[in-house]
Amino acid sequence: QACCDLLDDDEEEEETQNNNTRKRRKGYSRARLHTMMKSGNPLAVQLITNHNLAYMKKLTGDMRNAILEGKYDEFVRGFISRHFPGGSDDLEVPGWVKDALHAAGIEL
């Protein structure tokens, strides 16, 4: 969940202080991180690195669970459809992705 908390612009959480409840955004927006990067703020690099590590940790955990459940092919197809919404027959899915999946025995 840490990967989503860092960059999600729309995510809000409620904060209660002295019996007053207010909503505040969680994490940093992509626009703010972009501005921080352009201005040379070193915190931006650290935040983006933390986001990337959390994303990869979640992705590999999801992959592991799919393998253990015997649903890896289904996981891969879902992953591809989310990242290339044009579909497997569309030119949006790069040839090298199709070739790699074919070599792994996974057909879209």
Image (cartoon, rainbow, N blue to C red):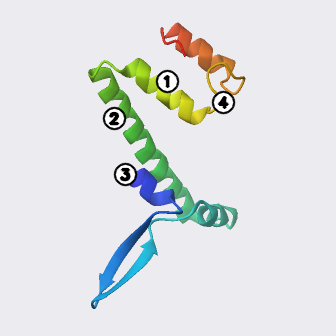
- Which mark is in front, 4 or 2? 4
- Give left or right: position of 97 versus 20: right
Label 1: how many Cα within 10 Å (few below 14, some 14–19, many 20+): some
Mark 3 vs mark 1, CA separation in Å:
22 Å
Mark 3 vs mark 2, CA separation in Å:
12 Å
Label 3: how many Cα within 10 Å (few below 14, some 14–19, many 20+): few
Give the image location of residue 56, x and y in percent: 43, 39
Mark 1 vs mark 2, CA separation in Å:
17 Å
Residue tagged 2: 61
Callout 4 secondary element: loop
Q: Which mark is residue 77?
A: 1
N-terminal of the pair, mark 1 or mark 2, is 2
- Which mark is in front, 3 or 1? 1
Three-letter amino acid code of the residue under disc 1: Arg
Give the image location of residue 39, x and y in percent: 68, 67
N-terminal of the pair, mark 3 or mark 2, is 3
Residue tagged 4: 86
Label 4: how many Cα within 10 Å (few below 14, some 14–19, many 20+): few
| Quarter residue 2 falls in | bottom left
Residue tagged 3: 1
Mark 4 vs mark 3, CA separation in Å:
27 Å
Question: Please, is residue 102 above or below residue 80 in the view?
Answer: above
